[in-house]
Image (cartoon, rainbow, N blue to C red):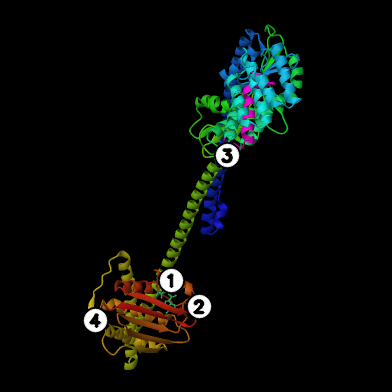
Amino acid sequence: MFEFLKHITPKIKILFLSLFFILIPGAIISYLSMKSIQEKADNQSIKFHGTTNLVRDKLESKLYQLETNFRNSVIDSILILERETEIQTLLQKLDHKYPAFTNLLLVGKNGELITSLLTHGQHKGSSSAAPSSELRKIFSKAENREFIEKNYMGAIDLYRSLYNRALSPQDKVIIHARIGRNYYKLGHFKQGILEYEKVLVYANESISIGNIPASIAALHQIAEGYQESGALNERNEILFELYQQLLYHPWDLSGGDYLYYLNSVIQQIHSAEADSMVELRSLEVRILDQSAYLHLIESEILGGLMSELKHLTSSEINHKSYQSEPGPAIELAYFILPPSIKQAQFLALAFQFDKDYLLTEIFPRELAAVELGKDITVGILNEQDSLVYLQNDLQLTSYLVAENFTQFFIPWKVALFDSTGKTIEQLSARERHLYLGLFIGILAVMLMGIVILVRAMIHESEISRMKSEFVANVTHELKTPLALIRMFGETLDSGIVTEESKRREFYSIIRKESERLTHLINNVLDYSRIDSGNKEYDFDETDLVTVIRHSLEAYKFHIRDMGFEIESKMPEDAVMILIDKDAISQAFLNLLSNAVKYSEERKHIRVEIVRETNSVLISVTDQGIGIASDELKKIYDKFYRVPNDMVKKPRGSGLGLTLTRHIVEAHRGKIEVDSEPGRGSRFTIRLPLT
Ligand code: ADP
């Protein structure tokens, strides 16, 4: 299958195979896992949508149930009622009893409305009896004095003359109010105020002064009296009371009078900021909202609603959303009343859900029973997509999925939130990133493994190449001196050399060659001892100068014979040091023989011993071929020989420097090299003296 790989170098082969067996399956696995993450995200999304729908349906069915109960109860209650005022009370009661519903509107056949908003206690004073004819006579006389004759005191006297009569509360209220008015005209505000205060005593819900509840009218006048007489504190107190009265007993939300009074009080009272104002303010907002709502219903919605109601036959509940400009949509629910209802003048009931109540009571209660998992929260979004309810007290903005309501509050949405605020994309992205990171991590580790493997293999093959080169070199190194020794030995043995000087020369050659042999064999043996951890050193207090000098002497002549110039500089005095003298000598000779081997034209060698305070340096400097800087680190490696372009590379074992360094380090010393290709090298052994 991989025939073609035969012709490729092992490095590329390994790379190719690792690519094939690791990267491609890795890519496939990562593709598949990405795909499955995507599928998981899709499933997740479907699941979330399903959950949202379930929650939405649950909420809607609750609303449906509430609404149906409410409708049945309304129908049952209306069935037993007769009078219009009772109906108003009933509507208010229903509004109260069913807090989920609000703004009840009973729609008459001709578009007239009775609402739960209209009154919250005080009705229009319509039931008061008209004053008797005798009373009316005195009233008109007094009015004549007041308005035509401008005789205010006279008018007051006339009204006062009525005091002893048996008067209805309504009449008493009118008399005191008129006396008060005349005192005001006279500028006697104090007396005027006293009269209006009497009005307050007699006033009750059904008593009015010209269509306005008597208490409201009187309070208003008292406030004005204080204002005129400069008693501002008292005026403010009265205004506050008036404000409360208006808010707690609104009497006609759709009428201009009520809003007029409320508005004028609001404008004056705004400076008074007390704690009790907070509640009043919210009541005010609510009442003004209701009033605006009622106005909107009457002016914009009622017409269309009427024509729709006429076509309805069953009392099913319908929902409609009206968009008022500007402002939020008005959601109205309505149903027609069954024909059996006696109050035939009423056609239908319209109402609204109390959204605040739904959001604070109904929804939380319903959702509390829903088990969604610890990281999921439900929220409700309104038509502007802003959060109006969130199950937990979290600050979340982005949701996972959202589904519109289908029957109620159609522009609203039920949304699922991740409790950490993540979107569905972010959720799956997190997983995707995790997997991707993991995959890249694994891949990186695999690639690292491959690189290490390739390097180790290259190193191994390099070592084995060096080893075979070593064998070839050593064999040659052994053979050459042996051949020489044998040849000269045989020559001498044959007796043909008679000349004494020649024989000496031959002996000398035999001795030198056997020394070379010894040196080589020593190196190889030492290396094998070091390699197997058996090398032992024999330390002795020795004069280093003598050791080096003797070693140099032994080879000096031989080296000079080869045309070298040797320069040496050594201290006069002995340098005593604890060393294995044979080992140090061997280390030095290795450096010396390298200097000889790796010199070409400039055959100059300098040997130097320098004593420093704490150490002694032995250096061998040549002017030979030098070593490239990137090779400097490797020359100490076993069997390593700098690849050389020189045609005649000197033979060697690649062990000399390995051994030298080992010896030096065994003496707690260091070996350094300073070399430049083409200029020469200097090897320095530094041995510590202590
Ligand atoms: P070898 O038997 O090859 O000389 P060594 O371990 O003694 O082994 O040296 C390793 C290599 O370092 C040598 O092959 C040579 O390339 C380089 N080298 C060592 N000494 C010198 C030097 N004085 N000048 C140039 N190159 C040297």
Q: Earlier in the sequence, mark 3 or mark 2?
A: 3
Q: Position of residue 626 (x, y in %)?
A: 46, 79
The answer for how far apart the CA atoms under marks 4 and 1 are is 31 Å
Region rendered in magenta: 206-233
- On residue 646, which mark appears? 2
| Residue that mark 1 sits on | 633
Label 2: element kind: loop
Mark 3 = which residue? 397
Could you tell me the amino acid type at mark 3?
A: Thr
Q: Earlier in the sequence, mark 4 or mark 3?
A: 3
**Distance in Å between CA atoms under marks 3 and 1:** 63 Å
Please tell me how crowded label 2 is: few (under 14), some (14-19), or many (20+) other residues with Cα within 10 Å.
Answer: few
Task: Report, in whole angstroms, how far the alpha carbon at label 3 lies from the one at label 2.
Answer: 77 Å
Q: Quadrant of residue 346?
A: top right
In primary-sequence order, the first of circles 4 and 1 is: 4
On the rendered structure, is 20 left or right of 523?
A: right
Q: Nearer the viewer, residue 438 or 184?
A: 184
Q: Earlier in the sequence, mark 1 or mark 2?
A: 1
Asked if the residue under mark 2 is in contact with the one under mark 4, i.e. CB atoms within 8 Å, the reply is: no
Mark 4 or 3: in front is: 3
Pointer 4: what residue? 542
Crowd class of label 1 (few under 14; some 14 to 19; many from 20; radius 10 Å) = few
